[in-house]
Image (spheres, rainbow, N blue to C red):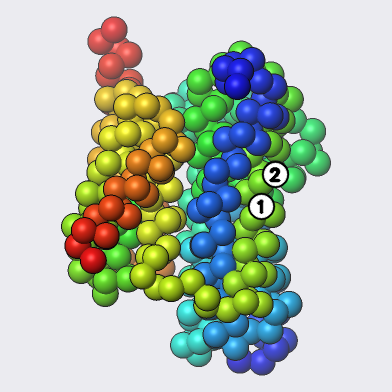
Amino acid sequence: MRPPSDRTPFRRGVAEGLPFIVIMVPFGALFGVLGVEAGLPLDQVMAFSVLVIAGASQFTAVQLMVDGVPAAIVVLSALAVNLRMVMYSASMAPHLGAAPLWQRGLIAYLLVDQTYALAQTAFDTQPRWSVSDKVAYFAGVALPVFPAWVGATWAGAVLGAQVPDAWQLDFAMPLAFVALVGPMLKSRAHVAAAFVSVVAALSLWWVPWNLGLIAAAVLGMVVGAEVDRRAEAAA
Amino acid sequence: MSDTNVWLIIAALGVLTYMTRFVFLGLIGDREMPPWLLRHLRFTGVAVLPGLVAPLILWPAATGGEPDAARLIAAGVTLAVGMWRKDVIQAVIAGGATFAVLNGLMG
């Protein structure tokens, strides 16, 4: 295998996105299983995964529907879970904002936690990539990740719960997120932001509609930026 | 809940979620953002993901919200390997293997 720097951005994206199939499959399959158990027909379960593509909010929506919550509240609560995507979008704009509109439109559609985290890490470490290199990398990452999500939802909905609980696949998604964070902790400012995010999210868990996470994220960004600014001023 | 209602929920959530992803990327595009904002945005990933995952690690639904030693240790190994090797895949493998071994031992 050639070193990563020799590969084209697209192929590097595919190579780095591919292992996430292992994580997307149990998560997507779990949504398929729960969707069917909640009484949704197959086409609606699939529509969730294709049109919303945001696991955590899909679980929230289905749970609230089962609980008989009014439709508008279902939508707003699930949407609150996705508010972090606004920050992902803003964070990608300096890298991808110059790409053609149709490309930005597609990237927005495919901007999920995994594709965002991989792209952010890659763009930070490859300052010489052109805009089209960055678009190619993102497309490469999304190529395996998105079909895995949709395919796994379908498999879960059709095949049902065949995986024994003893495998504890529920832990795959949290583990993947921890793994995505590790390489991002490259300065004291990044560590400070992550630390504040964890402490604030745990202290604010009682805040309704997932808004505690949004507050924790904003606090983390403010602290990270401030530590970074002071380090720069001292240098 | 009626079939039509479910479709309306899916459509509304789909469109609104898309807007959250498109709002900056699509509407701001390559217009200049102020340096202070760019500095904050560089910390988006480390400010969102740790807070998102911390309750899932500490209070897993699978154990009814009770902290679980195997999960905590496996998460620690994953984080350490990720920081050390700067590689997501090696971190996942190390953490997954740790979790599997601990589950086997504590069975």
> Is A165 left, or right, of A29 in this rendering?
left
User: Residue, x 67% and y 69% (percent of image)?
Assistant: A154
The residue pinned by badge 2 equals A143
Mark 1 falls within which chain?
A
Label 1 sits on what residue type? Phe
Label 2 sits on what residue type? Leu
The reply to whether dot 2 and dot 1 touch (C-beta < 8 Å) is: yes
Q: Nearer the viewer, residue B14 or A46?
A: A46
Real-space Cα separation, disc 2 to disc 1, in angstroms:
6 Å
User: Residue, x 51% and y 23% (percent of image)?
Assistant: A124
Residue A51, how many percent across, how many down? 69, 63
The residue pinned by badge 1 equals A146
Rendered position, A43 above or below A215: below
Quadrant where the N terminus of chain A is found in the figure: top right
Residue B63, how many percent across, how many down? 26, 71
Residue A162 seen: yes
Would you identify the image quadrant in which residue B107 lies? bottom left
